[in-house]
Each structure stands twice: as C-alpha cells, then as structure tokens.
Image (tube, helix red, strand yellow):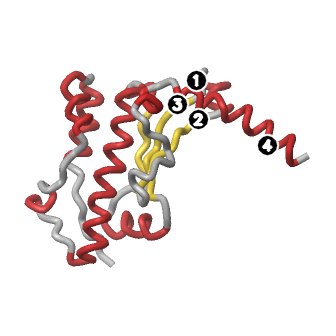
C-alpha cells in the first residue's frame, strides 16, 4: 500500500518538477533546495488541483521563513512570513527573479539581525548597504509596470521593530 501511495504522489508531483527543469528555474541552476538562503527559501506552488482548476501545473512561487526563529524575526519586525509570486501575474521568468530577490533581501536583514540583535541599525543608511542580485535590475529594465511596481516595493522593504 505504501509503495502505491508513493507512486501516485510521484506521478502527481512530477509535472511541477518537469516544468521547473525545462524553465528559467532549471536553466539558471536554482532549485528550491539549493541552499542559497537557508533561513528564507522558496518553493514551487501547484500540483494536481492547480492543473485541474487553473490548467497549469505550477501557479506560483512562494518565498517563506524556513523555521521558527526566522518566523519570530518576521514577527519582531512586522514582516510577512512569506511572499507569493504568481506566474500568471508576473510571468515565469519575472516570478522566479522576484521570489529569489525576496528571499535574498529578507535573508540579508536576518543575517544582520543575527549579528547585531535587537539593537540592529534600521536606518536608511544601513539599508543602503544591501546589494540586490544583478538579475533584478536586468528584469526591471524590460519588465511590465506590474513587475516594476513589485520590484520597487521590495526595494523599499524596511524593518520596523514592533511594540512588545
């Protein structure tokens, strides 16, 4: 019985990873478990329901806090624990760059928090030390206004210590 269940699951999940392998995700050499950001990671969202109801095997990519400490960091500074990027809304290539960029930026803040603690410098000057991945600027240069707006909102992302 367990073997049958595993086979069914593999058949139902396989189309998502086939899509990933043949897309920008696979060509760029990134996979959800590539270890680029250990505290904030991204996953492919979709599957059987998405295929049946939306007509595509993958609907979105989601960046999220990977463990309780990262979720606590998000709560402490008023950040959402995740960000979802719809392939229908942003396109496959842009959604991929957006999810990587979100994970990268939140990971950068988290690493600073681990070094500095609750006394972390949240000033605009400190935030200006963040270097965004080069593919974000490349996508921004040719993107739709919708993608450009989302990139701008991520560029403006700042931490705010929440009252206890």
Circle 3: element type = helix
Q: Residue at x 38, y 66 (%)?
A: 75
Quadrant position of residue 38: bottom left
The mark closer to the camera, 3 or 2, is: 3
Give the class, few, some or many, for how many residues have Cα within 10 Å of label 3's Cα (few <14, many ≥20). some
Quadrant position of residue 49: top right
Q: Earlier in the sequence, mark 3 or mark 4?
A: 4
Above or below, 151 relative to 27: below
Q: Earlier in the sequence, mark 4 or mark 2?
A: 4
Q: As rendered, which of 38 and 76 lies closer to the eye?
A: 38
Give the class, few, some or many, for how many residues have Cα within 10 Å of label 1's Cα (few <14, many ≥20). some
**Residue beneath disc 2:** 46
Do the numbered discs 1 and 2 sit on residues whose CB atoms are within 8 Å?
yes
Count of numbered badges drawn on the protein: 4
**Residue beneath disc 1:** 56
Q: Earlier in the sequence, mark 3 or mark 1?
A: 3
Residue farthest left in this picture: 125
- Give the Cα separation between the discs numbered 1 and 4: 22 Å
Q: Earlier in the sequence, mark 3 or mark 2?
A: 3
Q: Which mark is residue 64?
A: none
Q: Which mark is residue 20?
A: 3
């Amino acid at each position: 019985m367990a073997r049958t269940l595993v086979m069914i699951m593999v058949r139902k999940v396989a189309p998502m990873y086939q899509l990933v392998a043949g897309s920008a995700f696979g060509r760029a050499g990134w996979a959800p478990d590539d270890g680029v950001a250990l505290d904030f990671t991204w996953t492919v969202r979709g599957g059987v329901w998405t295929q049946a109801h939306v007509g595509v095997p993958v609907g979105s990519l989601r960046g999220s806090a990977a463990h309780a400490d990262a979720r606590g960091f998000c709560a402490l500074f008023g950040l959402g624990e995740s960000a979802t990027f719809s392939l229908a809304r942003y396109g496959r290539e842009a959604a991929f760059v957006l999810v990587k960029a979100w994970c990268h930026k939140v990971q950068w803040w988290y690493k600073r928090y681990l070094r500095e603690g609750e006394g972390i410098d949240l000033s605009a000057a400190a935030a200006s030390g963040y270097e965004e991945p080069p593919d974000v600027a490349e996508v921004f240069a040719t993107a739709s206004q919708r993608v450009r707006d989302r990139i701008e909102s991520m560029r403006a992302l700042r931490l705010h210590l929440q009252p206890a």
